[in-house]
Amino acid sequence: MNNEQKDQLLPSASLVQNGLLAEVPAGLNDLACAIYERNVEKGFYEKPKNIGEMLCLIHSEVSEALEADRKDHYANLPMFESFNDWNRPKSDAFSFESNIKNTFEDEMADIIIRVLDLCAFKGIDIEKHISLKMQYNAAREKYHGKKY
């Protein structure tokens, strides 16, 4: 992505401050930019990116989601949220790791994070492309003309 594309996609003010989102992004493009900014900050863009590797990492997250589902490993949000009642920060690693980490929901979040990071890296207006695809799919026949 060239600098002009980045300027068009990235928000004017950084959404990431001290490793945390300064605000909740308004849409997928803003979220993609915040994810990309954080990954740059964390050093994930110090080496040139390989699109094939980025796609394989998305696939690995899909496989991890499959395994979490096969093991019936789902997030325990009530327990995680109850940690707040114990005056423990919700960002506490123990509460996250024992109630959220490696669950189906966690892996689904990883998939979306990796996809949106790739979209920001490539300068893709994902909101526009999702809208276009949904319009196209609305006019297609059942199962899009396939057996299943």
Image (spheres, rainbow, N blue to C red):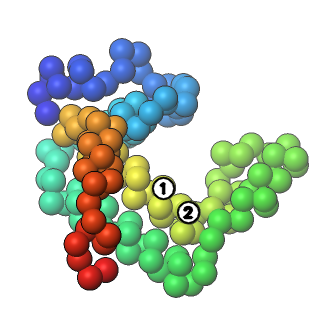
Query: Quick one: 17 or 9, which is closer to the camera?
Result: 9
Residue 116 visible, this orientation: yes
Please tell me how crowded label 1 is: few (under 14), some (14-19), or many (20+) other residues with Cα within 10 Å: some
- Quadrant of the rendering where the N terminus is positioned: top left
Determine whether the residue tagged by mark 1 lies in a helix, strand or loop. Answer: helix
The residue depicted at 71 percent of the width and 65 percent of the height is 76
Is 37 on the left-hand or right-hand side of 103? left
Please tell me how crowded label 2 is: few (under 14), some (14-19), or many (20+) other residues with Cα within 10 Å: some
Q: In the image, is residue 123 above or below residue 134? A: above
Query: Quick one: 125 or 74, which is closer to the camera?
Result: 125
Quick check: marks 1 and 2 in contact, CB under 8 Å?
yes
* Residue 78 position within the rendered picture, expressed as x and y whole percent measured from the top left: 78, 59
Is 89 on the left-hand or right-hand side of 59? right
Say which residue label 1 marks.
Answer: 109
Query: Quick one: 126 or 44, which is closer to the camera?
Result: 126
The residue depicted at 29 percent of the width and 36 percent of the height is 128
Q: In the image, is residue 65 above or below residue 82? A: below
Say which residue label 2 marks.
Answer: 105
- Quadrant of the rendering where the C terminus is positioned: bottom left
Say which amino acid is labelled 2: Glu
